[in-house]
Image: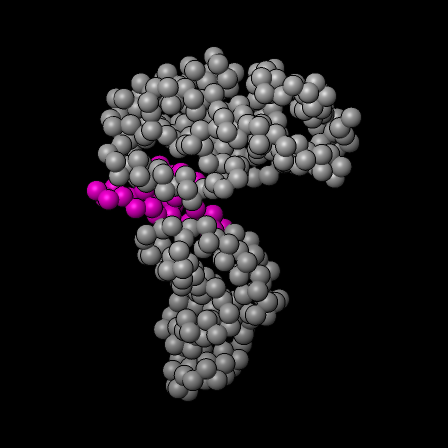
């Protein structure tokens, strides 16, 4: 008998909230065992255009496939967003799909119990009649089982599409065709899958005006992948969060905190073909660190002395230290750039996004 899952709400990039259901350790262990067996049963049934939560498949493969569709002349995209997908999966429909492949009634009963396990918040348990909340190891497989019906319908109609979990893009040749596809798929999802398409977030548009898995696609005849603007805003906000209260830490400690974030972010966005955004981010991060140094020095004499220790002439160091401008202005001024260039941060071990992406691209 599963225990109730613990409810945790986390912020979404668009400003909303995402609900997670965190199982107990024992339930997590059992939920992890179920997909190890069931994935071998259902994996052969999944579509080649589905890339999320599947062995040997990842987001980068989905992005490359999307670029190929645009390069092939599909210059319009039907960008569908399923409204609160994990919270609204129909239990009866899902169990019907499972029963078609699973003969063991005990396994079906166990999965039904996990689907209906209550959700605990502030000590109170509320029952659940729909949905398979994110947070448990079983939910990704169940989501693919539900959405395979959508994949098969798209294949039956001959559409070119890429799906990663509940993010689905259909590529068409014209805006008019895209509007027809969006309207018919909205009806199909509502009537057959008992789910809702978020009309506010779904649209028919040119691919370079939309984002998919954090990337966008350029408008060129030979389109390339680039980092979407919201992704740039999110990494900047994460850097700000990590550097809050940083004045009480040494520069080396701040760099040590930043590096795992920067290294992981660069590894994910290594498919980008545009370097300008990476150069801009690198320069902004170094300026944030110079700003911290300037604030930590506080006194004019300390600022002048440290600038001279970094090799600036006495007259220039004093002129920079006494300019009466704010820390952010000084962090971008020539005297701080000369005293603390990129090479100095490289020696301290600060991860450069541009250098890391270029190295990963060469390695691949």
Q: Is residue 143 above or below residue 28?
A: above
Report the side of 75 relative to 7 (left or right). left
Residue 198 image position (x, y, % from top left): 45, 24
| Residue 266 image position (x, y, % from top left) | 45, 55
Report the coloring of the rendering. one colour
Q: Please state which of residues 352 and 329 is positioned toward the viewer in this rendering.
A: 352
Query: Is residue 230 visible to us here?
Result: no
Is 235 within the magenta?
yes
**Residue at 46% across, 54% down:** 267
Taking the spot 54% from the left edge, 74% from the top edge, the residue there is: 297
Number of numbered labels in the structure image: 0
Percent position of residue 146, x then y:
53, 23
Q: Is residue 252 placed above or below 87 in the rendered structure?
A: below
Query: Residue 159 at what x, y percent from top left?
Result: 33, 25
Residue ID at (37%, 16%): 184
Q: Write down the region rendered in magenta.
A: 210-237
Q: Is residue 125 magenta?
A: no
Which residue is at 47% across, 20% downward? 149
Where does the C terminus fall, quadrant-wise?
bottom left
Q: Is residue 83 left or right of residue 90?
A: left
Q: Residue furthest top?
A: 191
Q: Nearer the viewer, residue 47 or 360?
A: 47
- The answer to which image quadrant residue 90 occupies is top right
Q: Quadrant of residue 122?
A: top right
Using the rendered image of the protein, determine whether residue 114 is visible from the camera's viewpoint: yes
| Of residues 174 and 344, the one drawn nearer to the viewer in this rendering | 174
With 274 as the anchor, is 26 left or right in this view? right
Quadrant where the N terminus lies? top right
Q: Residue furthest bottom?
A: 314
């Amino acid at each position: 008998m599963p225990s109730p899952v613990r409810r945790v709400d986390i912020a979404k990039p668009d400003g909303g909230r995402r609900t997670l259901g965190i199982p107990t350790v024992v339930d997590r262990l059992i939920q992890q065992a179920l997909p190890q067996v069931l994935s071998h049963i259902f994996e052969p049934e999944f579509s080649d255009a589905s890339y999320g939560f599947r062995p040997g498949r990842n987001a980068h493969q989905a992005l490359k496939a999307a670029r190929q569709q645009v390069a092939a002349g599909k210059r319009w995209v039907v960008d569908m967003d399923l409204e609160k997908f994990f919270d609204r999966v129909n239990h009866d429909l899902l169990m019907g799909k499972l029963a078609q492949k699973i003969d063991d009634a005990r396994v079906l009963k166990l999965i039904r119990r996990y689907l209906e396990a209550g959700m605990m918040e502030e000590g109170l348990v509320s029952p659940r009649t729909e949905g398979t909340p994110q947070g448990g190891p079983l939910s990704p497989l169940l989501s693919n089982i539900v959405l395979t019906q959508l994949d098969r319908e798209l294949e039956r109609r001959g559409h070119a599409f890429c799906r990663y979990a509940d993010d689905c893009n259909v590529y068409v040749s014209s805006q008019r065709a895209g509007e027809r596809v969006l309207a018919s798929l909205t009806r199909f999802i509502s009537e057959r899958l008992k789910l809702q398409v978020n009309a506010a977030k779904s649209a028919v548009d040119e691919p370079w005006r939309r984002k998919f898995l954090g990337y966008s696609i350029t408008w060129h005849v030979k389109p390339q992948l680039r980092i979407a603007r919201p992704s740039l805003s999110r990494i900047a906000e994460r850097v700000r969060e990590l550097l809050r209260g940083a004045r009480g830490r040494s520069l080396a400690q701040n760099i040590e905190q930043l590096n795992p974030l920067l290294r992981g972010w660069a590894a994910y966005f290594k498919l980008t073909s545009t370097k300008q955004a990476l150069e801009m981010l690198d320069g902004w991060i170094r300026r944030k660190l110079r700003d911290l140094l300037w604030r930590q020095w506080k006194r004019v004499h300390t600022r002048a002395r440290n600038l001279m220790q970094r090799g600036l002439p006495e007259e220039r160091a004093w002129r920079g230290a006494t300019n009466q401008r704010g820390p952010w202005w000084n962090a971008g001024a020539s005297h701080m750039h000369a005293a603390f260039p990129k090479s100095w941060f490289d020696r301290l071990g600060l991860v450069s996004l541009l250098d890391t992406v270029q190295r990963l691209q060469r390695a691949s």
